[in-house]
Image (tube, rainbow, N blue to C red):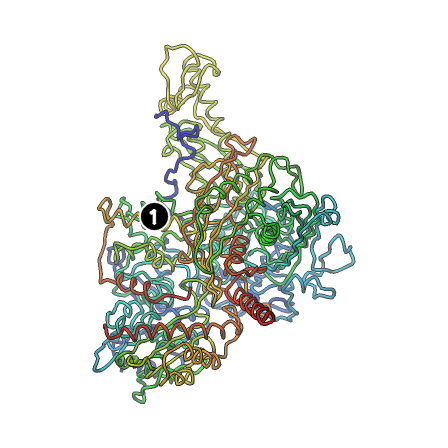
Amino acid sequence: MHAITYESPKTIADAVKLLAAHGEKARPLSGGTDLIIQLRAGTRRPEYVVDVKSIPELSRISFSLQHGLHLGAAVSCIEIYENADMRHYYPGLTEAAHLIGSLQIQSRASVGGNLCNGSPAGDSTPALIALGAKARLVGPKGERVVPVETFITGPARTVLQPGELLIELLIDAPAPHSSDAYLRFIPRNEMDIAVVGVGGSITLDLDDDRVVDARIALGAVGPTPIFAAEASKSLIGKKFDAAALDNAARLATSVATPIDDMRGTAEFRRHIVGVLTRRVLTTAAERARQSEQR
Amino acid sequence: MVKKVIVEATINGDPVELLCEPRQSLLEVLRDELDMTGSKEGCLTGDCGACTVIVDGRAVCSCLMLGVEAAGTTITTIEGLADGANLHVLQQKFLEHAGLQCGICTPGFLMSAKALLDHNPKPTEPEIRYALAGNLCRCTGYDKIVKAVVDAAQTMLTGAGSGHGTVPRQSPSEATSAMLGKGEEVK
Amino acid sequence: MAATTNGNGYRVIGTRPVRHDGVDKVTGRAKYGADYTFPGMLFGKVLRSPHAHALIKSIKTDKAAALAGVKAVVTSADLPELADKMEAAGEQAINLAHLSGNILARGKVLYDGHPVAAVAATSPHIADEALRLIEVEYETLPPVLSVEDAMKPGATILLPALRNKEDGPDKQTNVAAHMQFKRGDVAEGFKSADFIVEREFHTAMVHQGYIEPHNAVGIYSADGHATIYCSTQGTFVVRSLCSAVLGIPEGKIKVVPAEIGGGFGGKTTVYLEPLSVLLSKKTGHPVKLVMTRGEVLRATGPTSGSTIRAKIGATKDGKLVAAECWLAYEAGAFPGSPVGAGAMTIVSPYNIPNILIDAYDVVVNRPKTAAYRAPGATNAAMASETVIDELAEKCGIDPIEFRLKNASAEGTPQTVGPPFKRIGFVETLDAIKNSEHYKSKLTGPNRGRGVASGFWFNVGLQSSATVNIHTDGTVSVVTGSVDIGGTRASQAMIAAEVLGADINDVRPIVADTDSIGHTDVTGGSRTAFATGWAVYDAAQDALRQLKERVAKTWEKKPEDVAFVDGRFSPVSGNGVKPMTLKELAPRLARTGGPIIGRATVNARGVGPAFATTLVDVEVDPDTGKVKILRVTVAQDVGKAIHPAYVEGQMQGGTAQGIGWALNEEYFYDDKGILRNTGLLDYRMPTCLDLPEMETIMVEVPTPGHPLGIRGVGEVPIVPPPAAVANAIYKATGVRMFELPMAPPRLMKQILKKRAAGETQAAAAD
């Protein structure tokens, strides 16, 4: 590995100052489970590594029904699924956090880091998109909030400008009778990168089992995670039944642009998008129906 | 010459002050600076678990953490698992059940198993397998490793043996059970 | 000393003591190769080819050499150029020019990861950075990645000097060898068959996947001696190969065996060891090299991918009458695939009167293959055991009964060599047939049960052992066999058994090449068999001397001293008090001095191994993902010295076989670059991917061996891929002819079958 300088700022202002001063030569460090591998492989060669885990705002989970969720960018996956509110209100995002790597990885890796890594196959990103999450960024020019579905712009590329730092992810409190789910397909039972990942959220009108709102997001089937807008829209106002599911699965499959690689063929991935879309929506709907018991 | 930095941490109960380069991983610091070679390097990408140590109560891959990130932490490595000449129950059970062959993965498995039992003294077999899924063993097929951990947990519960340094934390076992039960993967 | 036996007529053999190296391994104290450090030690790194096939036009090392902290840079120009010459190395012979060319490429790179240069520096990071400063100019050539492409007329040639006997001295070729094995007349045989099944199989290149990467510390002294600390399966092989590659006499090289973190055949040759000495010689410092996982996968010795055609015929009452097989194995960049072993195992479990087997060793732009647990046999069994399953189905006979009807037994001719002596294949089939698993009913949708068998020769080879009697009556057992899976414990148990000693009073030691006689690799399932034999003989030698001392003390003849239940006593008469070893040992000084028992063997009469594996699977019909529900393996283990570690071999081999069956494969892009260079995408089973592993040890002693030991390490890897394939067929109706049976491949076949079914149904309407 090349030589690096390590910094561990305690405030957002200090972090942004460091990142802005060094521009492309600096890279924030959260859990490090991607960055350290990239440094070792030489695929990223920043001179400055800015550890953001000592900044309080990046390391907290705060939830209320009034203000929704503020999920600090550096909160580890374990802290997410150990949090009762997370498990209760965002089971899909929580299960995505529980799927990232091994327990050892989950001890360090963060959902914010997963997002900033810019991988199309990160497990938590489709789960965030399904929940309509927004990313709060602070940079030298101030603050901005961007929807997660526009955050990743290409493999390993994001909207982050030099000097800009992801502070937290913002998610609304779930509406009544709504829930989310995340599923991925992997060849083994743990430890793999998603061959396909699908996140889904759904809000039901329990009187007639009609879909009030739905969001479907796909991972690992294109250069970026994909918000399946048409598929999501197709469900709204419809009765949640097999025909609606099949239609949504078909539309979701149609926006996938997968490639052949060592993790699966394009043909297989398209097939799996359909399978997982059905399964994810079914699980999310079951949870939504039970959500009164929360 | 690369500038070294001073890092203070508590390792296996002892305060340690060391000098390291920022680019050195915790694994390199343990092995090359402190001569604690019990933690093993198998992949350097967090996929094999041979370098597992416990940092502030959690199992981590020491290859995916910089040495400088260890500042102020409390670390347990394989060298700190036994209480002097008394083996930890897990070590004893790995020996009794022949839960090792070549032994290169053994320190990592022991540390993952200790982290599990510290958090969840009554794990089910699926919970044990989940907790050990980040540790690869190529020799045993895992059968005897899992049996050793099951036996160790039972032995520690019945008080027939002591796992020293047990620090119960909040209950992620509940979280893991909930996840294993609900967040079912595509079968 | 308790005069108890464990029911098998033995007191120690067959028990399950804690292994002697155990405490060191659970406390992190055990020293593996990468754990060694020496004063002034430097760190080496290897520059590797980014191309699968290219000419090296130039290498410029001056910038790297100028980097602060860099002490030496070497290329193949620093190694003696060796002539094409075959040298025995463990289980197989190696061409020294090829070996040297694999340590550092000479003129041409032949695979992604082929070493081109090596650096020694004061830190591994500096060495790493120095690699980036070496400038290599390549002229790329088209890569040849499959045996099909390599065998095509006009194929790009990898090794301009390579010839085979068939094509003669004038024809350049990628086919290093063609072997043919023949018995009877297959054409006539097939005429008498009622059913003939012919299938073509493709299996992917796979890696042994040991968790410990290769390592070496080389120390070259000013007096011309070199010492190498490394994790290897065979110290003497490392010594002879380093001697050849470096041009240093064998007698001036000492190889010290570090603990070894798995090998499975992959650590029976050298990669870093010669470089560590070369760099040490150039710098005057000890030099340590440790591979990354990417280097292990790209540039050590996986086992061959293969194409196999198997055509087997049977009469309707289930008698096999003829088999015709064609096998082509990827050797990698240099000749030497295990295709010969594949050919000689493919139908050996069965008594078939007419066979014709053609086998081709083919070079391709992939790393040179090395041994992997029963090398060549697993690929072959995937083919034959799947075809056998299909034949059993056509005959309407239970697959185990079908195998029993044709099973090789004592007197059955082998594909090559003398007929089988006493073997336990039938016993493994019976054990599975009578198992609770086989008798249990498998219920539920998308589930299936499959069975398959496997055969492996095992080897004998040379071993040395000494047994030292210490003054307190404890014993040390010294061998040259590196302990990978618990063999030290079994060697100590054999000595303890012979000498009537407590197992905890026997210390087993694996010695360096200067401290023990020649001993071949830990491989070929030979260590318990051959080194165990040497230890048995050495312990007997010690016992004979001990009896002489007792006789001297008692003023009797040695033949008048009996040794029963750990006590020396007079054969007849009284008047003297029986003595234990512990009582005798302190008196050795007064009766003639210390006692060392010693023995060497060049072990003959090796007992081949058979295993039969039963697998239950569940297949997700929507994704093609296979879950292993239950697995039982029955194996003829000859005589289990330490049953826990015999079970461990059976379980570990089965786990590797399941990994091979389902998800492990080398994935090259069309430029010949390996894409899955880490354990994220080279997918070995985790503990969530495997169930409890049930084992049934069948003991059919090897005739001629003093303890009846039979090698156990390799054969359990052979049956699982075919057993899983046969189970998948039962679960889905789909026959798989490709490894691994990864979800995309299986799903494709399931969808194809479903579409065909729908077409048929539509046609029927």
Residue C363 spot, x, y in % from top left = 65, 59
Whether residue C11 is situated above or below residue C513 in the rendered picture: above
Residue extending furthest toward the front: C765
Vertical arrangement, residue C286 with respect to residue A107, above or below: above
Residue C613 rendering spot, x and y as whole percentages: 50, 48
Is C87 situated left or right of C207 in this image?
right
Q: Give the image location of residue C762, x and y in percent.
A: 58, 72
**Chain name for mark 1:** B
Relative placement, left or right, of A97 versus C531 is left
The answer to which image quadrant residue B46 occupies is: bottom left
User: Which residue is labeled 1 in the image?
Assistant: B148
> Where A267 falls versus C412 (above or below)?
below
Q: Nearer the viewer, residue C58 or C312?
A: C312
- Between residue C547 and residue A69, name the one nearer to us: A69
Q: Which sits in the foreground, C406 or B51?
A: C406
Which residue is at a point 21% across and 78% down the rendered structure image? A64
Question: Which quadrant of the rendered structure holds the C terminus of chain C?
Answer: bottom right
Horizontal side, residue A175 vs residue C764: left or right: left
Which element type, helix, strand or loop, lies under badge 1?
Answer: helix
Q: Hey, which quadrant is residue C134 in on the image?
A: bottom right
Residue C267 visible here: no
Asked which quadrant contains residue C595, the reply is: top left
**Quarter of the image with the N terminus of chain C in it:** top left
Badge 1 amino acid: Ala
Q: Position of residue A129 (x, y in %)?
A: 36, 80
Q: Residue C278 versus residue C291: which sits nearer the camera? A: C291
Mark 1 burial class by Cα count in 10 Å: few <14, some 14-19, many 20+? many
Whether residue C592 is visible to the viewer of this picture, yes or no, is: yes
Is residue C33 found left or right of A203 in the rendered image?
right
Image: B124 above or below A52: above
